[in-house]
Image (cartoon, rainbow, N blue to C red):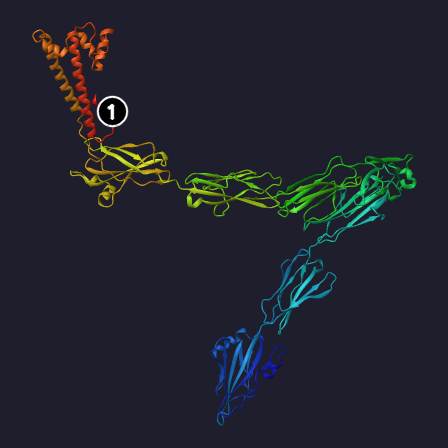
Amino acid sequence: MVTQLRGLAFLFLVHFTSHAVQIKHNWEVEYRDTSVYGVVGKAVILECGPSLPDMYIWSFTKPGTDAIKAVVYDLGKGTRVQKLAEVLGKLTVISNSAAVSIEKLPLAAHGLFTCQAFYDIENDPKVFYYYVHLTVRVPVSKPFLLMSDASPVEGSTMWMRCSLENGTGPIHYSWKHETRNGNISVFAEGNSSVINVTDVNRNHSGWYRCIASNPVNSESSNRLWLDTIFGPDIPQIDVTPYTMTERGYSALERETVSLLCQAQSNPASQYVWFYNNSQVYTGPQFTITKILRMHTGDYACLAQNTYLNTRSKKTISLTVYYPPDGSPSCSVEPALNHTSLRLLCSWAGGFPSASLRWSGGGLDEAGQRGAVDADSPGNGALLLPSEGLPPNRTLFTCAGSHQALRHAAACSARAYTPPAEPVCFAYVTSNRKYLVLSCAWDGGAPRAMVWWEGPGTGRNRRGEENSNILILAYGTAQGGKPYTCHAKHPLLVRTKTCRLTLEAPVLLTQRRLVSVYEGADVQLTCNLKDNYLPVSEITWFNNRGVDVREASKYSLLRTPAWANLTVRDTHETLDSGEYRCSTSNAVGGTEINVTLLVKRHPMPPNATLVTVTYNSRTRSEVELEWQVENEEERGFTGFFLEHTWVSQRPGRRDKSNDSKEETAGRIGQPVWYRNIIQDPEARSHTVGRLTPTENYQFRIIPVNHRTVGYPSPAKTPAEPRHNVYPAVIGAAIGGMLFAAIVTVLLLVFIIRNRRTNPRLHDMLFGLQHSQSRENINFPEDEVVGGSEEGGEGPAGLISPGKSRQSSSASISLTLFVRGAEQHCWSHCRSSHRHTQSIFTPHHLTSECH
């Protein structure tokens, strides 16, 4: 049976010996290692020594573990197969040996098989350990080819992958390419299942297949078509009949001309024909029967790849020869770097070409100097030497002749310089990327050549006709150095110039140092000095170097020429510092600093309470008066009038109505309650709705905007004073009335008894009326005397019609009243002197009266 198994074609058995067997002395175990390779689904034989041992035990160790599990054994009483053998394949023991055959080898059989063999057990036993390392290999399955893009665009990148379901490595991959013609070549090979194709081109189109190989087998995938999308290439135009000239293709009038367009493309191109930029035909071949002179022009073939939406175009010039129409055309152009003149005469069309001849400006005087040979069909040019150029506004004439024409045709051209001077100006592109210096000198025939010279440009005579621009990168222009534009005309020996001197912007401000009191709004100005180069936006940076944006703190008002920054609600520590205004133009940048100094308002002067008095015995209102030190400084805007209480007066009071603040004021530190007086002119105030049972204290604090002054010493209201003025006045009036009545009665008595008591009468009224008038001791006597002569005088005085006795009595009564008034005035003044109130003389007079 062993011979039959070894003869099978599908049996793969490979033996590798890792090291030689070491023979030791008796009673020592000998170890031998072998390696065996098997294929999944096939059969393999594991050898256990060269001969049949007396006993043997086969065991299996799974890779990655140390556990040794028995598979089959024979201890002299027959073979015993363990249950573990079911997962290791169809296991049988080869007869007359300890070798094991495994059919339909599974992948689970991969591992270490150990055979313990015992020989000569009865005599001199020997033990052998045979380690058989079984490697189970999986044959490669049929691969399938994947492409990232089966229709890649030419120039793109793609990848191809050879995918396998099964197969033990190492696996070798090979890609083969088959062209449309059947040519097969190896495209790539290696150990990687993926290949990257960079820069795909049209030659990569064709059939592709991949071949996967390992030591077990080799499999090939199905073919996969790779179709490279490309084109169209530049078309190729074939013209029939074929006639080439210097100007392109040519044809004779009334011939049939065929134009064929071909361009490589995948998919195939679609073709559109244009004649002088107008579409005339669709298809690869365009045929014109009986071509006419009007068909002369440019023919363009447009090839389109509709899949890629790409196109290519080629244009040819087709000239139909016929007799020239019209008349020649003349022009004058510069030559030899604008130091000389070239006369051009053109008469397009006609076959053969027309003959041209220049005249005028002294050309005929030189004889053949005026003859012109055609440089090309229908064109003639004449170069005038730089010596002896014709004067300004000289007229030149070109005469053309043709065999088909009876009369010659002519044209003329005049050479003259531009009427004005060159003009220079500068501007900045809209994206502020470049500075453009432009120079123009319009007019003239031929046109003048213009070029720039300046810092960094050197002397560059490669100018342009009529106008020229110099493009500088924004910010690279050099300020203060001139950029010169040169203009040269062939009729002038010297060049014309104009210059531009570029300058960086200059910023100005009204004040470099701005001071303001805290809490106010302040405006910082920044304006641009006149400059013809446009500048970037004027930017403000605050005192911390941060770009200022529109926010609640700042306000920006800007135009292209200025930008004003308003700092709102200034603060001494947050807003003081250096503010920076910055801008730039194509030449450079500049900035200007403005220092903002925010000052605190000055400390207001001290105020002192002068009078704090209850205005009544009910103690519900207090009148206060105060005065301010250094009042002429006016360093305040209002007052805080504060009050508190120090203790509770005796009496019953419902404490449940007390507020928490009042309770706190009585228990701990006094709590001051504030009234705001916004009038800085106020010097007095009345506080009402007071609790009569409380003892209050008041103090005054001046306020200057955000600055609060020092509080005045607290004062307790004084009780109202007793008013003695009505009693004094009443007593004085009563005494006066009583004295007047007594005096009147006495005078009446004396007058009536003047004869019985003449001495008393004479003592009071004098001896004679004339004598009493001569001794005037009081000013009132003058008033009385005047009244006697002038009629009725002031109220209370006696007129001349009264008796002399009545007049004397009136004088005495007046003196008595005057004495009473003087006594009252002295008493009133002494009474007010004892009081602490301040009264004016007017108040005193009114009180005493």
Above or below for 624 versus 766: below
Q: Quadrant of residue 135?
A: bottom right
Q: Residue 459: percent from the left, percent from the top? A: 73, 48
Residue 831 in the figure: left or right of residue 38: left
Q: Residue 489: percent from the left, percent from the top? A: 78, 40
Residue 607 in the figure: left or right of residue 70: left
Residue 465 in the figure: left or right of residue 611: right
Tell me if residue 749 can be seen: no
User: Along the line of sight, which residue is nearer the eye, 463 or 796?
Assistant: 796
Q: Residue 760: percent from the left, percent from the top? A: 10, 11
Q: Quadrant of the N terminus?
A: bottom right
User: Along the line of sight, which residue is nearer the eye, 352 or 726?
Assistant: 726
Above or below for 755 versus 122: above
Pointer 1: what residue? 843
Residue 232 in the figure: left or right of residue 785: right
Q: Quadrant of residue 590?
A: top right
**Which residue is at 70% across, 64% downward?**
177
Above or below for 761 versus 48: above
**Which residue is at 21% across, 29% downward?**
833
Q: Residue furthest top?
A: 801
Q: Residue 646: percent from the left, percent from the top? A: 22, 41
User: Along the line of sight, which residue is nearer the eye, 838 or 509?
Assistant: 838
Q: How many marks?
A: 1
Q: Amino acid at mark 1?
A: His
**Which residue is at 19% across, 40% downward?**
648
